[in-house]
Amino acid sequence: MTEEISRVSQLRPARPHVVIIGGGFAGLACARSLGNAEIDVTVIDRRNHNLFQPLLYQVATAALSPADISEPIRRTLGRYRNIKVMLAEVNGVDPTTKSVRFDDGGAVSYDHLVIATGSEYNYFGHDEWRAWAPGLKTIHEARLIRQRLLVAFEKAERTDDPEEKQRLLTSVVIGGGPTGVEMAGAIAELGRFMITRDFRDLSPNHFKVILIEAAPRLLAAFPENLARYAERSLVEGGVQVLTNTPVENITKSEVIAGGRTFSTGCVVWGAGVKASPAASWLGIEGKAGGRIPVEPDLAVQGFNDIYAIGDTALGMGESGKPLAALAQVAKQQGDYLGEALKAKLLDGRAPEAFRFRDRGNTAVIGRNAAIFDFGTWQMKGRLAWLLWAMVHVYLLVNFEKRLLVSIQWIWRYATRQRGARIIDENAATQVPASTRRTET
Amino acid sequence: MTEEISRVSQLRPARPHVVIIGGGFAGLACARSLGNAEIDVTVIDRRNHNLFQPLLYQVATAALSPADISEPIRRTLGRYRNIKVMLAEVNGVDPTTKSVRFDDGGAVSYDHLVIATGSEYNYFGHDEWRAWAPGLKTIHEARLIRQRLLVAFEKAERTDDPEEKQRLLTSVVIGGGPTGVEMAGAIAELGRFMITRDFRDLSPNHFKVILIEAAPRLLAAFPENLARYAERSLVEGGVQVLTNTPVENITKSEVIAGGRTFSTGCVVWGAGVKASPAASWLGIEGKAGGRIPVEPDLAVQGFNDIYAIGDTALGMGESGKPLAALAQVAKQQGDYLGEALKAKLLDGRAPEAFRFRDRGNTAVIGRNAAIFDFGTWQMKGRLAWLLWAMVHVYLLVNFEKRLLVSIQWIWRYATRQRGARIIDENAATQVPASTRRTET
């Protein structure tokens, strides 16, 4: 039985056991590079799928389906017989007994531990805002935003009250980083299309998308000229951009920011992330938004058998500046750590320090508008948009998804239709309460 | 403003207003055939999308995404400027004032009313079973079944208790009609694949799919030899078929049927439908499972301005037997009624009686196995399966969906992979309670 073999092999002292918490870009890259090595690997995630987060905004705006951008972690790692996958929620680590604890009472022990638990949205002490302003980190949140957008339009169509109509057709996006810019651009496109094509009693004059940013300009991580281009493109697409406008409060139907009150039917939060709470598991203090400081070999400072990679780790770039919480950093760190662990555990070699190679930074504003910053050179406009689309299709996990997403994009480019405009039944109909409880 | 024009036009006595409740096969067919006629049409549905129910079992078994088989009703009807779509839940009809009431207090008045509200699963007086044994009528239910199946496998992988493992890997499908047969076959395929390919601690010996039917044989609507073939194919695929086995009770983890107790991790209900409660709106008594008896012109008996079509209507075939609750009956009735209303309202002609044309009946058991009954001749096996696939792709609503579904089927045929194996986060992670409440 495979079952027994794998159990026994974990007991053999000769075969080290690496436990990876988190199956995102960082964790999966690390697991893959340990694939089929003489090392037992266990990947633990609270979700059964990895998610291609850069395209999650397209699920939220009804352009793609969740399955187009996610894949079961088991499927991704299925070909490596030395890797086990567990669906579990970690709630603690005990470095003394070298074990990871789950919230259901279970536990698993490790020889080497890799923490790749990512980041979550930061509401800066106002967690009560989350209910009205979901972020964009999970399929659940993307569906929630899609649901609110589409329901707001349906309700607007039915109401005779012009103020209520105006409120329902006003979307507010908070945060002028790439996610906020992408969401604002995509909502503007979706709304304009639906109003002109599918609704009878809605007027484009009522439709508003407001992008709110506390800082003086959008896209702080990009050069100023690209950010200016992005803002111009957004405004041309019908988005109202408000910079220097810090958010003061969010309720079910209002956003108060910069002293003004905005009545709204749908709010999206994209205003900053913080690391997962993994630092507290280790009893250390996270820095720069809860991130775990790591050594040049990505070991957690003060430990020699625990590593941290991806958004939850605070690594240093060559310039001495902290590395940003980006997918490409996570992926490179995962690749590096897998190789480093093999060198260390199998050959007894000490690995060289991790070096980040910047592949360039990109954001998409909408149809025919994107920006690329490669440091020494830049791109913007239609060509950048085409490159953005090609890169993102290429980064999808397999050929099937690449083909499916390409077809949907080409279809959408030609028709401006959005394929996934589904309002879940439970929004508008009665689902038995017990069924509901079971699912959520 | 379009808004004002459409309002005014509804007041003009010369332009009759037809209200259609329900945007399924029947309601949409009726609306379409009234498209761009000199008639105002309002389509009311509690969902914003129509659903291609014949393929819903593929969503439940992670083969397709919800968006692949559903489309916004607004999009389907968007090109007809005389048709308005409303997202609302109807809870009553007043034939005296000729108006339809909504549960949110709204109402709309009609000149002619078409009731196309479909059917729902019948738990034969045991509605408490619904929580543990969802049917397969909505996207919500399909996702719920998918979720339970996938979570059961994940839990089975983690448990060391062999009895619990056996329970979690046992699925019970109740009802031996086409839905039950399709679900049992699809679950067997999915489970076998996942166990051999993606899990480490599960053995095929533990995996069981049990199909339970109260009657002496499966597929009562098909000739006996086709039903026997279907049963043989299911058994070859690893499904245990129990006929003459009426269900006595269903709890969270058990099904009691025919005096035996089956411990199970996932139950699916497909054991009979009843009509929507529309008969009670009209104060008449439904027959044969709550269906509304209709005249040969599909008018509800006793009314000359209210019609019923599709699953919720009880029409008579040429042989004097009631017409079955089938998609093809619904579609033909919708087409007919649209034309009949045009004849009546625009030309003052009395339409001929509705005549059902039987296009044949089909069910699919699994890879390379399906059955067709065309009355005078039959088909089964691989060729029938190919024809089944082609017919169902063709019946999808537009070219994009046809292409997307075809690609996924070809991919799946070649690799046996299932693209949509997503467990929603809220099953395994903590979603803020308030967010959860908002969505459901």
Image (cartoon, coloured by chain):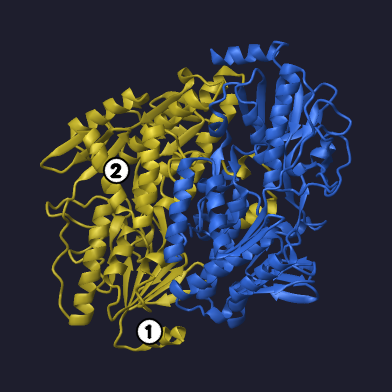
Chain colours: A yellow, B blue
Q: Residue furthest left?
A: A376
Query: How many marks can you see?
Result: 2
Q: Which residue is at a point 48% across and 79% down the rendered structure image?
A: B201
Tag 2, which secondary structure? helix
Q: Which mark is residue A10?
A: 1
Residue B89 appears in the picture as rendered: no
Chain letter belonging to callout 1: A
Q: Which mark is residue A389?
A: 2
Q: Which residue is at a point 44% across and 47% down the rendered structure image?
A: B403
Q: Quadrant of the C terminus of chain A?
A: bottom right
Kindly report which numbered mark, 1 or 2, lies closer to the viewer in this rendering.
2
Q: Nearer the viewer, residue A68 or A214?
A: A68
Q: Is B120 situated left or right of B168 in this image?
A: right
Chain letter belonging to callout 2: A
Tag 1, which secondary structure? helix
* Residue A410 horizontal/vertical position (percent): 36, 40
Residue A254 appears in the picture as rendered: yes
Q: Nearer the viewer, residue A225 or A350?
A: A225
Q: Is A229 situated left or right of B385 in this image?
A: left
Give the quarter of the image for residue A244.
top left
Q: Which residue is at a point 26% across and 42% down the rendered structure image?
A: A388
* Residue B414 horizontal/vertical position (percent): 42, 64
The Cα atoms of the two marked residues, 1 and 2, are separated by 43 Å
Q: Which residue is at a point 37% across and 62% down the rendered structure image?
A: A23
| Amino acid type shown at disc 2 | Ala
* Residue B90 horizontal/vertical position (percent): 73, 34
* Residue B106 horizontal/vertical position (percent): 71, 26
